[in-house]
Image: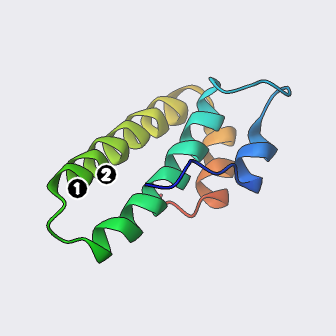
Amino acid sequence: MPKKKQTENTESFKRHDKDTWSIEVQISSLGTEIKMLQEHVAINKSDFDAKRSLLKKVARRRALLKYLKAKKLSVYNSISKAINVKV
């Protein structure tokens, strides 16, 4: 599994230089990890640990998006557009 890459989306949602725990950054990071796992699972169809990990990350991102939608709707709309998540 390759190391986690920082994307432009993650950088744009940071509140300060060392921000890794704001909800926006977590959602963006999970999106990057999900894309990498999707590519891995497409190639390695019998890697059930990776499939399980992918499902856990998708569920975590969904929960964070649900929380964000309830608390800060404008931020939720901007993030969902930036990471191309169905609304």
22 shown above or below 42: above
* Tag 1 and tag 2, C-beta contact below 8 Å: yes
Q: Position of residue 36 (x, y in %)?
A: 47, 61
Q: Residue at x 55, y 41 (%)?
A: 27
Specify how the rendered protein is coloured: rainbow
Q: Place residue 1 in its image quadrant.
A: bottom left
The numbered dot on residue 51 is 1
Q: Secondary structure at mark 2?
A: helix
Q: Please tell me which residue is depicted at 30% across the width and 75% down the height of the picture.
A: 42
Q: Is residue 85 visible?
A: yes
Residue 25 is situated, as x and y percent measured from the top left of the image, at: 65, 36
Say if 22 sits above or below 74 in the image. Answer: above
Q: Which residue is mark 2?
A: 54
Give how far across and how far down residue 29 sits, in percent: 58, 44
Residue 86 is at least partly visible in this image? no
Judged left or right of residue 86, residue 4 is right
Neighbours of disc 1 within 10 Å: few (<14), some (14-19), many (20+): some
Q: What residue sits 60% from the left and 42% below the top?
A: 76
Q: Residue furthest bottom?
A: 43
